[in-house]
Image (cartoon, rainbow, N blue to C red):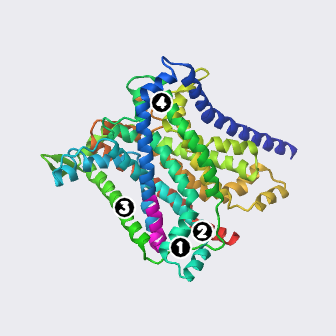
Amino acid sequence: MKLNKMINRISEEIIYLLIVAGVLLFILYPYIKIFAEAFTSGSFGITEYLSENMMLLKNSLFVATLTTVASLFFVLSLTICFLFLSEKMQKIFRIGLLATMVSPPFVTSLAYITLFGRRGFITHDLLQLSYNPYGPQGIIMMQTISFASLNALVLIGMLKNIDTSMIKSVRSLGAKSDAVVKDMIIPLLRPGIIVVALISFIRSLADFQTPTIIGGGFRVLASEGYFAVISQGDIHKAALINLTLCLPALIVFFIYNHFEKNVASQSHGQEQGSLALPRKGLFFYGSSLVSGVFYLLLILQYVTIVVNAVTVKRMGNFYWSLQPILDTRVYISDTIIRTIVYSLLAGFIGSLLSFLIIYYSQVRHSKLMKGIEMIGTLPYLLPGTFFGLGYLYAFSGEPFSWTGSSMIVIINVIFKQLAFATKAASASVSQVDPTYYKTVHDLGGHTLNEWKDVFFPMTKQGFALTFINGFIATMTTIGSIIFLIRPGQKVLTLVMFDVVQRGLYGVASVIACLIIIICLVVAGLIALIFNLNGRRKRHVSFRTTAK
């Protein structure tokens, strides 16, 4: 018995140390390494670099600011429109937003070129216009549409924390829908609005794919950093560029951390339920119009991708054809299995790691693990290319010569998704009554017994959701791994990025459809195996009763 206790204790300590060492080595160390290299090596210094690239910095800030404003406009419209919908329509509304989460990051740009390019279906074929789609206007438009879905889901998730009894009270006193939205809903959502604005700003600064594809002659720092590595082989210049992007991101990070805590702790709800408001007033009609336009753009985007994948254009006319699918086989013959395996491993290991971090942080109240959890948010809040370059510096020489291996790519995507994974794990773990853990110890059990009999069995639905998110995130990622993968070991998103740059839009559309189908199939299988819909309902009722 004593031997078993000792083995369990040693095993737990080893796991704890491995988690701490893993986060420090694969998140903190690459960032420290790239900071050190940017300041101490290279043929030119920071002062010279800033003087040569000030215009690029201004362009990046300009695009990020306008994208943030435009994205907030759509996000607020979608969130307000959600308030006026019935429960059935709210589910459909959410599904529409969630569907965009399984798309590769530059699908919007691909659809934009097909529809509004120099030979676009709408601008050239229908309207006979000679329109230049390339430049800051295209970047801002595409980033706005790409960011709006996730941001809207964040704000819609906050609505459940609003006390419906307050809404009923003011409505019983004669308050109209417009007054409820303006004086109650929007002020209560203010911390979340600030958070999604900051996230949009950071994501716009870090986005190099959209400017590379549709930026034309308009250059920003993120795309310049990409070309510095790919075209010029100047890693030091790329490090300085990413360091420049990192500085405003770090400032935003501290602001985000403050308001994110407010979002996480905000729970006004004594009574929860549907917030469906009477369909009247300026906010209802305005938000419905904007939401309708947004969903029309989404539908047009995905229809364009599907049509592109099964048609060819000859002499200005479209013809149904399997040629794009046949042409795609050359590019993905040895890529599909590799991408799925990487995603499965990253989804499972990332979920397991995030749940263990939350266990030590929330259940065991480890201060060190709380710090580890905060370090885990860095890869999400800082540019993805910065994270990838950090791996180049940290793991391309002694003592860690791992660059170019499949292992380092999988490790990168595991730790890249840690921020989202720990947030999801935290929400799931918080639903488990702490007395269950005490019961295990009262019966003579240890930490490993807690994990086996309580922790993982009672959080497996959350684990499944985290796995789905990790799988999809890896299937659609590109920024943090683009510098780590050798030409013969590419994944689907990198192949798609390459063929888009070559102008092979039909092949790119087929790959985009393939990625979406794989993500939906895996998500559907996991949901079916774990019966996520039924479990979610039971857990929602549990939370409501507990409050």
Label placed on residue 295? 3
Relative to 284, residue 3 above or below: above
Q: Report the predominant secondary structure element of the magenta stretch.
A: helix
Q: Are marks 2 and 1 in contact (CB under 8 Å)?
A: yes
- Spot the residue most to the top: 43
Tell me: 225 left or right of 332: right
Q: CA distance from mark 2 to mark 4?
A: 42 Å
Name the residue beneath numbered marker 2: 162
Residue 125: in magenta span: no
Q: Quadrant of residue 529?
A: bottom right
Amino acid type at mark 2: Ile
Magenta range is: 74-91
Q: CA distance from mark 3 to mark 2?
A: 26 Å
Name the residue beneath numbered marker 4: 241
- Spot the residue most to the left: 315
Pick the residue in front: 264 or 74: 74
Q: Residue drawn 25% across and 45% down? A: 324
Tell me: 302 left or right of 547: left
Amino acid type at mark 1: Leu
Pick the residue in front: 418 or 134: 134
Q: Residue drawn 58% across and 64% down? A: 188
Pick the residue in front: 98 or 220: 220
Q: Is residue 332 visible?
A: no
Which comes sooner in the sequence, label 4 or label 3? 4
